[in-house]
Amino acid sequence: MHYVCFHYEFEHDPVDPDRECEAGGCPSGALGGGRDTVTSTARHLSAEASGGPNWENDTLSAYLEAMAAWLDDSDGYYTKQHRVRPSNAWVIMNDALRAATGYE
């Protein structure tokens, strides 16, 4: 049996097939939205930064370097949170935007 067929038959229930479930590697995760959440987070951080951000990484170069470092280390973040790494890249990007304000 294919993994996707097995997953939807035995692991995904009772979650809506269009939504990502808690099982790692859920095929629905790649289909899920998240763009609206990411754009909302980016706008919130932009407004926060417009008054002079009170972040550890308060320059664009420091922020981007921190985001790259967080993305490199994101597997550890999800492990510490007792979460499976999301299969939806929007979720990861949203976490990265927030984490980069203070990640070392």
Image (cartoon, helix red, strand yellow):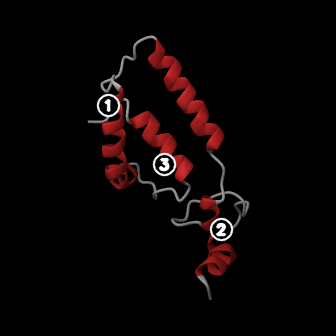
Give the residue type at disc 2. Answer: His
- Which of the marked residues, 3 or 2, is nearer the chain's N terminus? 2
Residue 25 x, y percent position in the rendering? 53, 67
Where is residue 39 drawn, in percent x and y? 60, 35
Check disc 1 and give the amino acid type: Ser
- Marks 3 & 1, CB-CB < 8 Å contact: no
Return the residue found at the far left: 104
Viewer-side residue, 78 vs 31: 31
| Residue under pointer 2 | 12
For marks 3 and 2, give the one nearer the viewer.
Answer: 3
Q: Which mark is residue 61?
A: 1
In the depicted structure, whether residue 47 falls above or below residue 65? above
Crowding at dot 3, Cα within 10 Å, few <14 / some 14-19 / many 20+, comes out as some
Q: Nearer the viewer, residue 85 or 60?
A: 60
Name the residue rendered at 40%, 13% in the picture: 52
Kind of residue sitting beneath label 3: Ile
Question: Which element is circle 1 on?
Answer: helix
Of tags 3 and 1, the one toward the viewer is 1
Classify 16 as above or below 6: above
- Report how far apart the C-alphas of labels 2 and 1 lie in the structure: 41 Å
In depth, the one of 83 and 91 nearer the eye is 91
Q: Residue furthest top?
A: 51
Name the element at disc 3: helix
Q: Secondary structure at mark 2?
A: loop
Please report the residue visible at 40 percent of the width from the left and 52 percent of the height from the top: 78
Residue on which disc 3 sits: 92
N-terminal of the pair, mark 2 or mark 1, is 2
Q: Earlier in the sequence, mark 3 or mark 1?
A: 1
> As drawn, is 7 to the left or to the right of 87?
right
**x, y percent for residue 83:** 45, 54
- Relative to 14, is 77 above or below? above
